[in-house]
């Protein structure tokens, strides 16, 4: 039944540009677009920026290649407003992302932009949602009231082949106060060395005092605690 409804839904679209972070949700939407529109009618656009983990950009590139989709990476404009790190930071970021992707869609003559917003995203405050509405972005998962359970089913073949989709927020979420590129680089370097062993790690190098957090509660061994303590001290820049 779901397949029939989705087929009817996607009949409205001939082509699409997918705002593609490489995460689970946008990957599911990209796979849906390929299934219903055909890979030749889909373009995936991924943004590059100091506040976006590079491994996520690489995941996006590899996934698009696996699905046979044209992939475009673009440098994101980092505004002073974003670096101020005010409560509307996510909105400011999303607005710049969608502005850039909209420019690509216009260049390619494609009317619709898809994103990975799902029904569960509406259950919490997400400032970036306002930008999605402003730019008229199409959210296939949300429109069909689909959430994480459906996403997991769609991306299951990739996971079976070894793909990983860490649920990671951007680098800027680790920083309180003014954001600088040096701070962003320091956080990314620190987490890159620990991510495989410590899933969901958040290196808060610039808190007072600096600390290590996790997205979900995690039981650590004494050896792991010592390792994290050492890595935390090593990773704190002398000046930023």
Image (cartoon, rainbow, N blue to C red):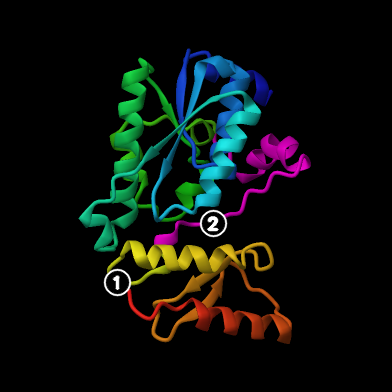
Q: Helix, strand or loop at disc 2? A: loop
Q: Nearer the viewer, residue 15 or 128?
A: 15
Please report the residue visible at 65 percent of the width from the left and 68 percent of the height from the top. Answer: 198
Q: Helix, strand or loop at disc 1? A: loop
Disc 2 marks which residue?
168
CB under 8 Å between discs 2 and 1: no
> In this view of the protein, can residue 37 be seen by the observer?
no
Quadrant position of residue 219: bottom right
Is 84 displayed left or right of 188 in the figure?
left
Disc 1 marks which residue?
177
Q: Quadrant of the N terminus?
A: top right
- CA separation, marks 2 and 1? 20 Å
Q: Is residue 52 above or below residue 223?
A: above
Is 150 displayed left or right of 145 in the figure?
right
Q: Quadrant of the C terminus?
A: bottom left
Q: Nearer the viewer, residue 174 or 129?
A: 174
Q: Which residues are magenta?
A: 145-172
- Give residue 234's position: percent from left, percent from top: 52, 80
Please report the residue visible at 39 percent of the width from the left and 49 percent of the height from the top. Answer: 49
- Give residue 112's position: percent from left, percent from top: 40, 22
- Packing grade of label 1 (10 A; few <14, some 14-19, many >=20) is few
> In this view of the protein, can residue 140 be seen by the observer?
yes
Q: Is residue 216 above or below residue 163?
A: below
Please report the residue visible at 45 percent of the width from the left and 55 percent of the height from the top. Answer: 124
- The answer to whether residue 160 is magenta is yes
- Give residue 123's position: percent from left, percent from top: 48, 52
Q: Nearer the viewer, residue 129 or 160?
A: 160
Please report the residue visible at 52 percent of the width from the left and 69 percent of the height from the top. Answer: 190
The tag on residue 233 is: none
Is 181 displayed left or right of 58 in the figure?
left
- The answer to whether residue 205 is magenta is no
Q: Is residue 176 above or below residue 60?
A: below
């Amino acid at each position: 039944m779901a397949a029939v409804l989705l087929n009817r839904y996607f009949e409205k679209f001939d082509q699409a540009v997918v705002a593609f972070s490489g995460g689970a949700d946008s990957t599911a939407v990209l796979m849906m677009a390929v299934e219903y529109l055909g890979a030749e009618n889909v373009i995936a656009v991924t943004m590059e920026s100091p506040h976006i983990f590079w491994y996520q950009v690489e995941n996006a590139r590899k996934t698009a290649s696996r699905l046979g989709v044209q992939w475009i990476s673009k440098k994101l404009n980092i505004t002073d407003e974003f670096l101020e790190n005010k409560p509307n930071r996510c909105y400011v970021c999303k607005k710049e992302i969608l502005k850039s992707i909209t420019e690509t869609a216009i260049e390619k003559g494609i009317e619709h932009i898809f994103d990975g917003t799902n029904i569960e995203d509406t259950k919490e405050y997400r400032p970036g949602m306002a930008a999605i509405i402003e730019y008229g972005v199409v959210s296939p998962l949300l429109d069909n009231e689909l959430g994480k359970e459906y996403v997991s089913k769609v991306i299951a073949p990739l996971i079976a082949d070894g793909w990983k989709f860490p649920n990671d927020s951007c680098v800027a979420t680790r920083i309180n106060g003014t954001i600088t590129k040096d701070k962003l680089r320091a956080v990314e370097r620190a987490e890159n060395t620990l991510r495989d062993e410590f899933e969901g790690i958040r290196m808060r190098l610039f808190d007072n005092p600096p600390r290590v957090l996790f997205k979900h509660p995690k039981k650590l061994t004494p050896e792991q605690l010592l390792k994290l303590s050492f890595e935390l001290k090593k990773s704190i820049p002398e000046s930023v």
